[in-house]
Image (cartoon, rainbow, N blue to C red):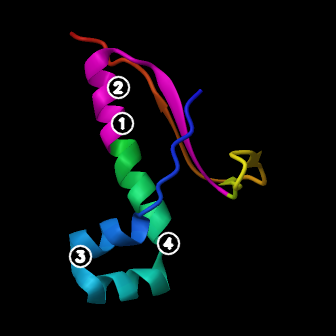
Amino acid sequence: MLIIEVTNARDVVRQQIGRLGERLIGKVADAESQVEKALIQEMENAFQEFGIEARIISVKGPKLDEGDSLQIPLQVREARDITLKSKE
């Protein structure tokens, strides 16, 4: 199992849409969830290419504390099953 924590979501959004867009997206959408959605799409493409089947779940809640322990209150934002496409 892999856990990936995006630690610079606001910076990524700022680079993609600029400072004004970052301010607006902060009011209408969560920068972290937007970056995670894009990351999931990229991972899905790569997994398909390598023949990997997986389930990727974006959740809100888990945090790593100072001692590298994981706190687990979860709220699922998005889940995606990745299966291999048949070649016809």
Who comes first in sequence, dot 1 or dot 3? 3
Who comes first in sequence, dot 1 or dot 4? 4
Amino acid type of the residue that numbered disc 1 sits on in the rendered structure? Met
Instruction: Tell me if mark 2 has few (under 14), some (14-19) or many (20+) residues whose alpha carbon lies within 10 angstroms of its own.
Output: some
Total tally of numbered discs in the picture: 4
Amino acid type of the residue that numbered disc 4 sits on in the rendered structure? Asp
Which quadrant is the C terminus positioned in? Answer: top left
Magenta segment: does it hold 58? yes
Q: Which residue is mark 1?
A: 43
Residue 47 image label: 2
- Label 2 sits on a secondary structure element that is helix
Who comes first in sequence, dot 3 or dot 4? 3
- Asked if labels 4 and 1 touch by Cβ distance under 8 angstroms, the answer is no
Taking 8 as reference, is 13 left or right?
left
- Asked if labels 3 and 2 touch by Cβ distance under 8 angstroms, the answer is no
Q: Which residues are magenta?
A: 42-60
Q: Which residue is mark 4?
A: 30
- Asked if labels 4 and 3 touch by Cβ distance under 8 angstroms, the answer is no
Q: Is residue 45 above or below residue 61?
A: above
- Asked if labels 1 and 2 touch by Cβ distance under 8 angstroms, the answer is yes
Taking 40 as reference, is 86 left or right?
left
